[in-house]
Amino acid sequence: MRSKILALSKGDEFKTLLSKRKISNKYVTIFFGILKNKDVKRLNISFVTKKKIGNAVKRNKIKRRLRNIINEAVKQISLKFNYSYLVIAKSSMLDNDYTNIKETLFQELKKIK
């Protein structure tokens, strides 16, 4: 089965999303907005972890967790596929339990309209 997630690729896309709307909590900051010339049938999302958080192993663990949560959110929550998302992780993701992070992110994603 083909993945429903498509990563943002151009620097201009990141810059325009950073100027759009955002939602923040103790685990992540989510920037979202409508980008032109994007595939509406697939979810345009990118995950960013800063080097300040830790080494590559820790950063990749955070990205894997986020990717897994978003895959479940696509199935359970009606995410808007016309929006593009930029998810910036915070260092508190390493210390907390996966289920707590998942519940908090689901609540934040439901707020996006």
Image: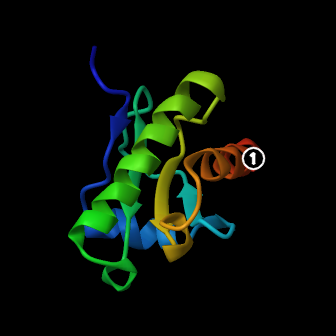
Q: In this rendering, is residue 110 above or below 61?
A: above
* Extreme-top residue of the structure: 1
Q: In this rendering, is residue 4 above or below 59?
A: above
Question: Residue, x 41% and y 44% (percent of image)?
Answer: 67
Residue 87, given in percent of the width and then of the height, sits at: 48, 60
Q: Indicate the quadrant where residue 41 lies.
A: top left
Element under disc 1: helix
**Dot 1: few (<14), some (14–19), or many (≥20) neighbours within 10 Å?**
few
Q: Is residue 46 left or right of residue 104?
A: left
Q: How many marks?
A: 1
Residue 91, given in percent of the width and then of the height, sits at: 49, 75
Q: In this view, does 15 lie to the left or right of 103?
A: left
Question: Residue, x 31% and y 81% (percent of image)?
Answer: 51
Question: Residue, x 60% and y 66% (percent of image)?
Answer: 27
The residue nearer to you, when weighing 34 against 106, is 106
Q: In this rendering, is residue 93 above or below 36?
A: below
* Extreme-bottom residue of the structure: 52
The residue nearer to you, when weighing 44 against 67, is 67
* Coloring scheme used: rainbow
Q: Indicate the quadrant where residue 103 lies.
A: top right
Image quadrant in which the N terminus is located: top left
Q: In this view, does 94 lie to the left or right of 113?
A: left
Residue 76, given in percent of the width and then of the height, sits at: 63, 24
- Location of mark 1 (residue): 107
Q: Indicate the quadrant where residue 56 lies.
A: bottom left
Image quadrant in which the C terminus is located: top right
Residue 14, given in percent of the width and then of the height, sits at: 38, 67
Question: Residue, x 67% and y 51% (percent of image)?
Answer: 100
- Badge 1 amino acid: Gln
